[in-house]
Amino acid sequence: MMEAGRHPNINLLAYSEVKSVKGKAGDFTVKVIKKARYVNETECTACGKCFEKCPKKVPNEFDMGHGMRKAIYLHFPQGIPAIATIDKDNCFYFSTGKCRVCEKFCEKKAIDFDQKDELITLRSGAIVVATGFDVYDPTHLTQYGYGKYKNVITALEYERLICAFGPKKGELKRPSDEKHAEVLGYIQCVGSRSLKDNRYCSSVCCMHATKEAMLAKEHDPKAKSYIFYTDFRAVGKGFQKYIKRGEEDYGIKYIRSRVAEITEDEEKNPIIWYEDTVSRSVKRKKVDLVVLATTLVPRKDAPALAKVLGIELDDCGFFNTDPFTPTDTTKKGIFVCGYCQGPLDIPESVAQASAAAERAADVILAGSLCSQER
Amino acid sequence: MNELRIGVFVCNCGTNIGGFIDVPAVAEYAKTLKGVVFAQTNLFSCSESGTTSIKEAIRENNLNRVVVAACTPLTHEPTFRAACMEEGLNQFLFEFVNIREHCSWVHMQQKELATEKAKELVRMGVARAAFLETGEMTDVDVIPSALVLGGGISGITAATALGGIGIKTILVEKEKKLGGILKDLYKLYPTGEDASKFLDKKIKSLMKFKNVEIITSTEIKTIEGYIGNYTVTVKKGEKEKEYKVGSIVLATGAVSYEPDKSKGKDFFNFDGKKIISQFQLENKLKKGAIKEKNIVMILCAGSRTPERIYCSRICCMTSIKNALLIKKANKDTEVTIVYRDLQTYGTDYEEELRKSKQAGIRFIRYNEVKPPTVDTKKKSVMVYHELLGRDIELPYDLVVLATPLVSHADVENISQKLKVPVDEHGFFLEAHVKLRPLEFATDGIFLCGCAHWPADITESISQALGAASKAAIPLLMGKVTVEPIISYVDEDKCSGCGICEENCPYGAIKKDPEKKKATVTAVICKGCGICATNCPEQAISIKHYKPEQVFAQLEAAFKEE
């Protein structure tokens, strides 16, 4: 992020959305709405005075609602560019006409309540789409009790809870009673590999569950982790070794199983009911906290963006590519990389990002080469 | 020397440091240290506001040394160096002290002691800063052409990409023909496309580029040089030829593990006839329809075992693809896949698995503790069925073993010539497993395809395009910038013994045959210091880590001011 933010050839337009794309490969005209932050970008130094003083608290989206932020805020502390933004819908001044506390305390006089959305026109030879994914909401999968039982959370919520600068300052306190979670159950394939929900495999959850279990142990030597899986998918470089380390050094128990239901006892401890497909028996396991590995799904706005760009989606809703031209979309000059084109882990995304950059460079550089024929 | 004016900036890193260390106390302590004229705390030193306040402090206090106590140089050294430079302070007069990874994160439970340690670390950094010297980055010219090593799908793709953006490229293949493993495959998953037609198409589009020279039946004899300036000598039969290139893409691939027939007894009774490898099956399919009526495929044959712990990634899908092809040709043929975990990750592959189940292919899971056995007398595969809780017998007239991809026999040789490392399984080792998957620690050499790790065609193409992109950057920039943190030789002390040359992992230091003294090639040197520690005459030191700089730091570690 820092590297991209610092690169002299990169112009970052954050808090912005593409509205229209016209033209063809080598010559696109792109209209972008740069949304009003109500903060002067060149003046703001992200010193934090305004968020300290702002009287309005809002659940923090970045922490999956497990912590609070203010109506003027940074999306997350290390975000690039580091510029405060006023959340118009929650700001007292915008709703009641009174407050302006942030303005009073801003030493740089960066607050600008009159700022307007800006329409920017860009010209570019090629476009790279790298919009990532959304996390599947498992509420309707009632057997897991998500939304009903406080101590059933998603993997991404877990990441925030255990993060040193997360809402619990890195202490693995479970939501119901702030008790340290010591026995953890990780349920894999929640909403994935299913004809009823998402047909595909998210590809990264087996590994992130293992990592999460390792983190639990590093945070608390007493922690015990149970991973309930279908097929254990560890195909990347060094992954099998990592799993073995998880088993041998971290004492992680991998249980090949189908989880039928999660119930709760009086102390709000989740009870996992599952069929152990190795011993052929129905069993149950009481844990302190359940972590659901929910499917990673196409972004909600993917269809709208596809329409703006004039590209197609595949059957699963990711941006469509041909297996042997993995970064080319269905429109010339528009390329794609990372999870928005289908499940990939970090190294694969990094490699594919370079691939998409190559394809984009090809359009731009090949335009200036007369002697060669494509 | 001018008066020392050191500024110290202690970062809270949100709560990463501030939550465990008394940051204001560390800053106050810093003010008491010799040479320190200014100290402050930052919420995030790396943020815009943090760097702005550092810059202001440099300007207002006329600082000539800057010490930031925060995270790691890896993440933010460039940030703070840039801040110094923007205020006209030489970037090598900046010193980074790590009080996060080296202190707050590892001493979360001992806040007071952690604060004391942070003070000591800052004291050491300040002591070292006093002895820092200015340094300059140097630019080195680049030869604007590339070498692609290996002519499989990865090498072909990389060379086509480089050719397409106008870079003069040399593609070297040791075999007579391009294509690598693809030459021997029947059809490709997940498209069902004919492998040979696909390969022909790829080779044709490569051949279009006049700026790409393809040389087959050729091996690398030597590679000398460094990023921007490699001299490659290739050997074709007895003929040798020299090329100059600026960067290198390594795409030497892997091979399918072929069991030793004489030791077949220990390997599912492999005989290469009725018990064959998946790779052999590809060949068999290529030649015509499969006549056998009962086929059993055993997955993880020779992988995920104690001696070869890794998963070869492509075998599940290869087996499913071939099983589907067999079923399609003759729906009465029984195909059973005996597996451990099915690696049909992602969208398309999961769909293929579903199709194969619908086509009537049978899947039976086995446990590594009770692997299947092949009984050649009964012509049956015996497998312990976990759900039934007993052994079942699968009659066969053909057993197919899904053996893994393994590294080439000559991988050591390539590794030595290029001076790049391989892992325990003989796959090339990238610079960073997550963030730099296509690069080596040595600048100017890039990696893609099965030489890195088993990958299918889609993944190999992605990686090859990516590696081409990385390899093209220095060539298109036209220059490479080199840091001055490198070793230098005091020729008066050097005895010309050559120990440094033997120990240098990058080939950066050599004995000059005429002067009989060690000389350093700045661009290659990474400043690792191995030469300095091995030099019996103490004639070598590392700039920016000179003895006086390091000793000042050490003395400060053991002495209260």
Image: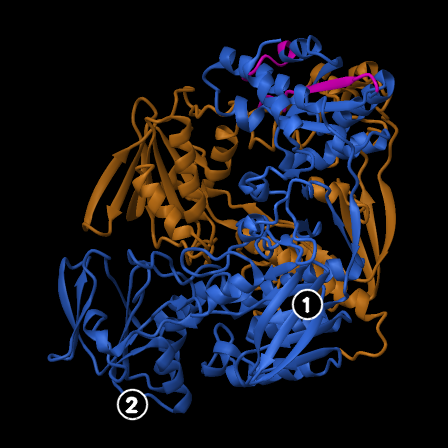
Chain colours: A orange, B blue
Of residues B364 and B413, which is closer to you in this image?
B413
Looking at the rendering, the stretch of residues picked out in magenta corresponds to B2-25
Q: Image quarter for residue A304?
A: bottom right
Query: What's under tag 2, amino acid-wise?
Result: Lys
Both on one chain, marks 2 and 1?
yes
Which residue is at a point 61% across and 76% down the rendered structure image?
B234
The amino acid beneath tag 1 is Thr
Query: Are the residues flagged by discs 2 and 1 in contact, CB closer than 8 Å?
Result: no
Q: What is the chain letter for disc 2? A: B
The picture places residue B172, in percent across and down from the top left corner, at: 61, 76
- In the image, A318 versus A43, the foreground residue is A43
* Along the line of sight, the residue nearer the viewer: B408 or A33: B408
Residue B155, image x and y in percent?
59, 72
Residue positioned 60% across, 17% down in the render: B556
N-terminal-most mark, 2 or 1: 1
Let me know if residue B23 is in the magenta part: yes
Q: Quadrant of the N terminus of chain B?
A: top right
Check if residue B416 falls in the magenta segment.
Answer: no
What is the chain letter for disc 1?
B
Residue A6 rendering spot, x and y as whole percentages: 76, 41
Q: Residue at x 51, y 75 (%)?
A: B191
Q: Is residue B177 above or below residue A33?
A: below
According to the picture, the residue beneath numbered tag 1 turns out to be: B231
Question: Dot 2 lies on which element?
Answer: loop
- Residue A82 in sight in this render: no
> Which residue is at a point 76% across and 30% down the rendered structure image?
B133
Would you place residue B143 above or below residue A216 in this image? below
